[in-house]
Image: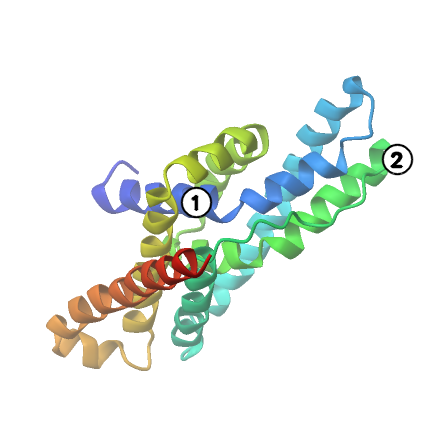
Amino acid sequence: MFSTDFLSGLLTIVLLDLVLAGDNAIVIALAARNLPKSLQTKAVFWGTFGAVAVRVALTAVVVYLLKLPGLMLAGGIVLLPIAWKLLKHDDTAPEVTAASGFWAALRTIIVADALMGLDNVLAIAGASKGHLGLVVLGLLISVPLVVWGSTLILKLINRFPAIVYIGAAAIALTSARMIAHDHLVAGWFDAHTWVGYVLDAGLIAVICGGGWLVNRQARRRE
């Protein structure tokens, strides 16, 4: 449990969730904003509990599916636009109607988190390398942090943009590892180990370097 691979995988999962789930935290806050103060904390707590349960179930399914030949390769490719989108600043807040009652808020939180968390599920499933216990532990640590520390996390990301680039690099690295470990191509990558390192560095450079250049040009135009 305390091996280097386990701890590095856990750190990657927590980092991915903190960087990817900012919008989810805002959705939770918006859904519960019209409730009385006494019910807001309760709705957020049980909404988070339900969201974690749904996220674990979805991730378990994805972890199983990624064992099928070709799907891990496809999943790795799908992660790349997710990493790219992460670096594109979008100042628009998600449109969420405030719920009028406790159960409505609870339903909104769980459903919205499930729909918006599909990118998290794929990234976490890839980073876990099939270890479901790692997925559960990572989610138990990161989801409550996202929910109760959403304002702080968003302020930190705005103040230190490097956090987003680190998250994008982690997704790109996860994508490269998923591609290289797919059953269809794993044998070839094992026979040419240097290609795997080139793929790791190349995808990180393309995503982070390309994202930085695009953002720089956008700022100049503004």
Compared to residue 205, the image places residue 17 above or below, namely above
Find residue 105 and report its horizontal and vertical position in percent.
79, 38
Which residue type carries mark 2?
Ser
Query: What residue is rendered at 82% in x and 21% in y?
Result: 36
- Quarter of the figure with the N terminus: top left
Query: What residue is rendered at 62% in x and 50% in y?
Result: 92
Compared to residue 130, the image places residue 32 above or below, namely above
Mark 1 / mark 2, whichever is N-terminal = 2
Residue matched to label 1: 133
Of 168 and 181, which appears nearest the observer?
A: 168
Q: Is residue 145 left or right of residue 93?
A: left
Find residue 55 and report its horizontal and vertical position in percent.
58, 49
Residue matched to label 2: 100
Residue at the farthest top position:
38
Find residue 146 and report its horizontal and vertical position in percent.
53, 35
Which residue type carries mark 1?
Gly
Compared to residue 77, the image places residue 221 above or below, namely above
Q: Element at badge 2?
A: loop
Of 131 and 149, which appears nearest the observer?
A: 149
Q: Is residue 29 left or right of residue 141?
A: right
